[in-house]
Image (cartoon, rainbow, N blue to C red):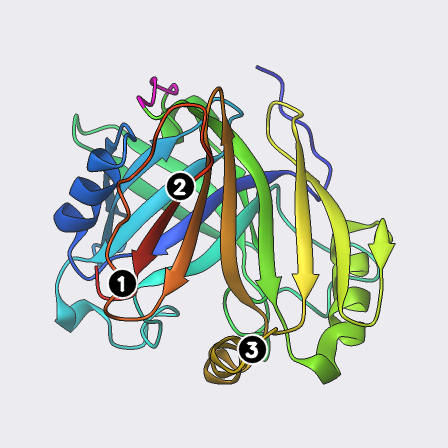
Amino acid sequence: MSLPVKPNVLDHLVFLCADLNAVAANFTAAGFTVQNGGTHADGRTENMLLVLRDGVYIELIAFVDSSKKHSHFWADKLPGWIDWACLGVKRGETGIEEFYDEPIDGGRLLADGTRIQWSVSFPHKHYPRGSIPFYCGDKTPRKLRVPDSLEHTNGVQGVKALTLLCNDTALQASVFLYSSILRQLPQVQSEKHAIFQLESPLHKSIELLLRTPQNSDEEKKVMVNNGDIIHQVELYGDAVMIYLSIADETTQVDLSAKPHVSSVFILSNDL
């Protein structure tokens, strides 16, 4: 598989878990096939993967134990959608170097002892993690980091759209920021939202929607994050449409999916 090098290719979405096995069980019950990942090279986090047919994957990640959280860049994040990555690295490109630090090496040890390696470009610290994507470029074959997609019994094939919330007064700044990072102008823009175009590694179109909050709960989420925040991930499939959202602490996973009917799966912050 040849991989594109454009700056708008979505690689993966990161979902932080308080209990990795429990969240994996919820995804499994919702019809997803969860694959084992491994422990990251720093020994602080471990993951499991949901690989989609379009080449994008969802990373379920957790700290190995609470003592590993200190000074980690995700230490202050609550469980739920916390970050996302595009393919490639950001290195010395005119117009974007002020947004990203120099690439650093990373890796993960697979269960069979295979060590995989990559380089990542993380945003400068004044951009909250998750408000803009980080970039991941493989140093070993991507197929080692991202196993082949397995069938999901709920029919999910890939990512249709990604929605980020941003403060009313910050939307125009976010549009400028994303225009610079993705090297494109928004396809649609208004006072309340803007739409950019992402791609999957297998060249499937993905909509990136930046919009302002529509109610007080959404406003609180943006304030807590102090920047743009992942609000919703929309997946497509043969017979279902699934929305994975962050909801209040009491909401559980809705398992009421029916064939040929749009279905809503909500993952709570305390899963």
Per the picture, the main secondary structure of the magenta-coloured stretch is loop
- Examine the rendering and report whether any part of residue 102 can be seen: no
What is the quadrant of the N terminus in the image? top right
The stretch of residues the image draws in magenta is 148-153
Residue 164 is situated, as x and y percent measured from the top left of the image, at 59, 62
Q: Residues within 10 Å of mark 1 (few under 14, many from 20)?
A: some
What is the quadrant of the C terminus in the image? bottom left
Residue 20 numbered mark, or none = none
Residue 204 to residue 89: above or below: above
Place residue 189 in its image quadrant: bottom right
Residue 58 numbered mark, or none = 2
Residue at x-position 82% and y-position 50%: 183
Residue 251 numbered mark, or none = 1
Q: Residues within 10 Å of mark 2 (few under 14, many from 20)?
A: some
Callout 3: SS: loop
Residue 37 to residue 133: above or below: above
Mark 3, residue position: 215
Q: Earlier in the sequence, mark 1 or mark 3?
A: 3
For badge 2, the amino acid type reads Ile
Q: CA distance from mark 1 to mark 2?
A: 21 Å
Front residue of 84 and 68: 84
For badge 3, the amino acid type reads Asn
Front residue of 197 and 107: 197
Q: Earlier in the sequence, mark 1 or mark 2?
A: 2
Q: CA distance from mark 2 to mark 3?
A: 27 Å
182 in the magenta segment: no
Q: Earlier in the sequence, mark 2 or mark 3?
A: 2
Residue 198 is situated, as x and y percent measured from the top left of the image, at 69, 41
- Examine the rendering and report whether any part of residue 4 can be seen: yes
Residue 63 is situated, as x and y percent measured from the top left of the image, at 21, 60
Q: Residues within 10 Å of mark 3 (few under 14, many from 20)?
A: few
